[in-house]
Amino acid sequence: MAGATASDAHPTMGVKIFSAGAAACLADVVTFPLDTAKVRLQIQGECRTSSAVRYKGVLGTITTLAKTEGPMKLYSGLPAGLQRQMSFASLRIGLYDTVQELFSAGREDDSTLGSKILAGLTTGGVAVFIGQPTEVVKVRLQAQSHLHGPQPRYTGTYNAYRIIATTEGLTGLWKGTTPNLMRNVIINCTELVTYDLMKGVFVNNKLLADDLPCHFVSALIAGFCTTLLSSPVDVVKTRFVNSSPGQYTSVPNCAMAMFTKEGPTAFFKGFVPSFLRLASWNVIMFVCFEHLKRELMKSRQTVDCTT
């Protein structure tokens, strides 16, 4: 990322990938209830039965879930979420600097906006294809409720992988790849590029040192911009991934059904928990990511000095 101090040793690609994966997992554990609340709010409106539980607001959704289905329901799908971060975030964030350097090779200015955007597009796209099965299972487990029937669709993470693969085929594990690709390309570009740009502005203009306050503010701004741009695609992705076979014929059909039945505001359902989750996730992840990179490189230098 931009703004590294001269005294910092450049982290290796392996250090970046490991740091990104570990930081993303920690951020996921802390913010997962917000993500579950976002999913429940996004799918609200699909089921119009009188017995369906109605969720209102972030805290209302979390409270209602805890009361009606138990506190542990807020963490339903967490194993798949951690698998997703290890296979997805580690690549899209950990490879960002390396890919950016490839795109800017041979140029005088190695940190152009174009190279940042291309790097975000590339790492985000590759990571989606690798991590999509974990996304499908995570959303399905977060969305399922025992209140809609005595028998849940899935009893656990690996049970969900098996049932989806056997009933919907292996392609079922990659269901919703198109909207998820669109969503994560937007998120990756906006999140990483905004963070990189803001951090560069603060450090290069000597407004903030390359330390915790700089990382915190840059991550917060990146979280807001990312939520604003990705929310419509995120809602469509959640609805389509969670849908039963045949409910929607395609992603555009899903989007059109939402628009005609619920209006344009349906595309921003769960915006507040989505922002709270993304902003807090960004702050925890980027702060831990920067700290881990530095500590791992210091440890490596210490080992090199003693050998």
Image (cartoon, helix red, strand yellow):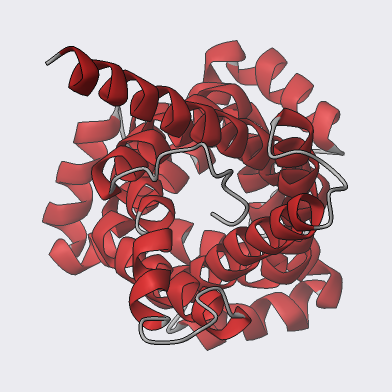
Foreground pick, 76 / 248: 76
Q: Residue at x 22, y 52 (%)?
A: 164
Measured from the top left, where is residue 1 in percent x and y? 54, 54
Q: Residue at x 60, y 12 (%)?
A: 71
Q: Residue at x 86, y 39 (%)?
A: 56
Answer whether residue 152 is visible to the viewer in this image: no
The quadrant of the picture occupied by the C terminus is top left
Measured from the top left, where is residue 199 in percent x and y? 71, 53
| Relative to 122, 229 lies left or right | right
| Relative to 301, 249 lies left or right | right
Measured from the top left, where is residue 59 in percent x and y? 83, 27
Q: Residue at x 52, y 42 (%)?
A: 143
Query: Residue 209 lies in what quarter of the image?
Result: top right
Answer whether residue 265 is visible to the viewer in this image: yes
Q: Number of numbered discs present? A: 0
Query: Residue 113 lies in what quarter of the image?
Result: bottom right
21 vs 165: above or below: above
| Relative to 117, 55 lies left or right | right
Foreground pick, 122 / 134: 122
Query: Residue 107 lies in what quarter of the image?
Result: bottom left
133 vs 247: above or below: above
Measured from the top left, where is residue 133 in percent x and y? 28, 54
